[in-house]
Amino acid sequence: MTDAVPQTVVAALEDPFAQLTGPLAGTRKLHLEVAGTGTLTPHMQRLQLTAAELDGFSYQPGQDVMVLVAADGRKPVRRRYTIRQFDRAARSITIDVVRHGDGPGERWVASARPGDRIEGIGPRGKIFPDPAADWHLFMGDESALPAIQVMTEALPGDADATLVLEIPEEADEQEVLAAARTRVSWLHRLGRPAGDPSALAAEAAEVELPPGNGRAYLLGEARVVLAMREVLARRGLAEDQMSPKAYWGRGRANGGHGEPARDA
């Protein structure tokens, strides 16, 4: 049984999230324990986490949990992972984590074993399915796949959803089980570098935008999200019809709070 960050180190951290106030007022500390871990696809690892604090827990589809994966001196290093599933009876959550490098989050995921412990804070996140939208467009890379899946699955049966998903290879495709009328397009990089905006931007230029008040959820690498947003804006989609969210930035590590670091 191993702590992701030893308690003696946690006690000495200069932690901006030591008190759950302001934007964190609706969250709770979670003393999580790894219940299971396994490979989901060649580039995706699935972990089940349990915690006593998950009793009475609730969240919106698309929200995440922020976990303390490491320390950089006295600074905490956290990463945010979408809540893919929540089992209320078992007091457990499932997270699916992309395996693509050697960052602090991936090192924790690679070494995690049942019984290991890690501190979490959740739920977090402000992008959810818009119940008033006439149609839904989800676009993103594999880092966005858990959020896109869970948001699509939350839509009612009379909803229309189009998913455009960029992944490393065909073996990384996952079944999308949703009540909504759903169309899925998979884009395989096949060795091209992740974070290249060309493929998803090209799809944004061609994807059908039905009439009515639709909503586009644009998720993934920072520059790719920006490129998709610009293309859809040129096609007439209003700012308030787009929900963009950068999960990572190509060529730079995320900040200690688990999101892409701002440019200096």
Image (cartoon, helix red, strand yellow):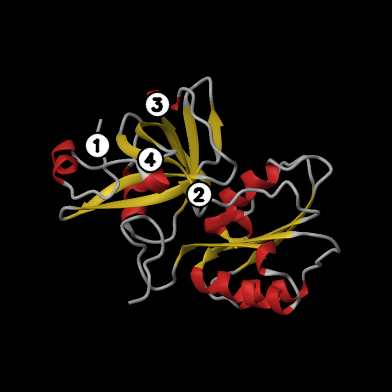
Q: Mark 2 packing: few (<14 Cα in 10 Å), some, or many (20+)?
A: some
Q: Give above or below for 127 relative to 60.
A: below
Q: On residue 125, which mark appears?
A: 2
Q: Name the N-terminal-most of marks 1 and 2.
A: 1
Question: Label 4, on which residue?
Answer: 121
User: Label 4, label 3: how many angstroms apart (C-alpha)?
Assistant: 10 Å
User: Label 1, label 2: how many angstroms apart (C-alpha)?
Assistant: 25 Å
Quarter of the image with the N terminus is top left
Q: Mark 4 packing: few (<14 Cα in 10 Å), some, or many (20+)?
A: many
State the image coordinates of residue 23 (x, y, percent, origin top left).
Answer: 42, 48
Q: Residue furthest top?
A: 89
Count of picture labels: 4
Question: Label 3, on which residue?
Answer: 53
At x 54% / y 75%, what residue is drawn? 196
Q: Is residue 239 left or right of residue 42?
A: right
Q: Secondary structure at mark 1?
A: loop
At x 56% / y 73%, what residue is drawn? 226
Question: Label 1, on which residue?
Answer: 3
At x 42% / y 38%, what residue is drawn? 27
Q: Secondary structure at mark 3?
A: helix
Would you say residue 115 is visible in this rendering?
yes
Q: Give above or below for 88 relative to 202.
A: above
